[in-house]
Amino acid sequence: MKGAPHRTRGGFSLLELIIALGVAVLIFANIGLVLRSGSEQREAQSIRGDLDVLIERTLDRISLALMSADVGSLDPTAPSPSFQSTLEYVQNLGVQNGQVVLGDAESIELVVQGGQVLWRQRPDELDERMVVWTRWVAEYLDGELPNGVDDNGNGLTDETGLAFVVNGSQVEIFLCLERRGEDGQVVRHQRSAVVTCRN
């Protein structure tokens, strides 16, 4: 006598479908996290690259302006090891008939409201000229907090995002820029330069 025909199962049970669906959700969630992380890193690198170009260009402008500054005109209100966020100076234009010819008064300053580096010629006069050299200046240098302590170990206390240290004919310039990405993360970039006034 032949046995009853054996039936084969024709699909997945509900439990198997739920497990497969759960595994698929985990896989797609991990893929999404990896893609988002990569996108955030690309954005941060792009912002860092933009800030690097801006810092380089701004430090070049400041350096060129200070190279021809008359050393005696530098405003040493905060000599080394202190800093100042505004530097006033006069350009040395050369010598004529044995006399030094000086240009108009100029200043480079941090405008905290708006985070700008501002160049001014003939400050506070009717024919004053002003140019914004960069934006996105941080309120304080990287690692620095307004607490009366040298938090970042550079010998200065509570230094702002643009800081000048005058030491004789040399000026050390510190500049820190920051921008917030679409994800809300702040990207900061900082650099410094030393300029010797030639006049």
Image (cartoon, grey):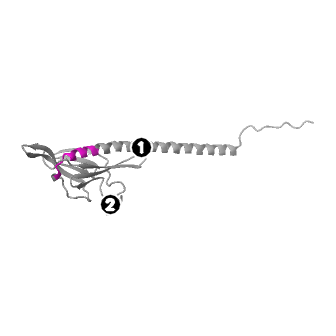
Q: Magenta segment: does it hold 68?
A: yes
Q: Position of residue 49 (x, y in %)?
A: 38, 42
Within 10 Å of disc 2 (Cα), the crowding (few <14, some 14-19, many 20+) is few
Q: Position of residue 177 (x, y in %)?
A: 33, 48
Query: In the drawing, does residue 110 fall left or right of residue 17?
Result: left
Q: Earlier in the sequence, mark 1 or mark 2?
A: 1
Give the class, few, some or many, for how many residues have Cα within 10 Å of label 1's Cα (few <14, many ≥20). Answer: few
Residue at the outermost left position: 97
Image vertical order of residue 152 relative to residue 27, above or below? below
Q: Disc 2 marks which amino acid? A: Pro
Place of residue 195 in the rendered image (x, y in percent of width and height, measured from the top left): 25, 49
* Residue at left offset 78%, top offset 37%: 8
The part of the chain drawn in magenta is 58-71
Q: Is residue 196 magenta?
A: no
Q: Position of residue 127 (x, y in %)?
A: 13, 44
Instruction: Report the amino acid beneath label 1.
Output: Gln
Disc number for residue 146:
2
**Residue drawn at 67 percent across, 43 percent down:** 17
Residue located at (29% from left, 42% from top): 57
Q: How many marks?
A: 2
Query: Which of 181 and 52 lies nearest the eye of the viewer?
Result: 52
Provide the residue designation for mark 1.
45
| Apparent side of residue 134 relative to residue 130 in the rendered image (left or right) | right
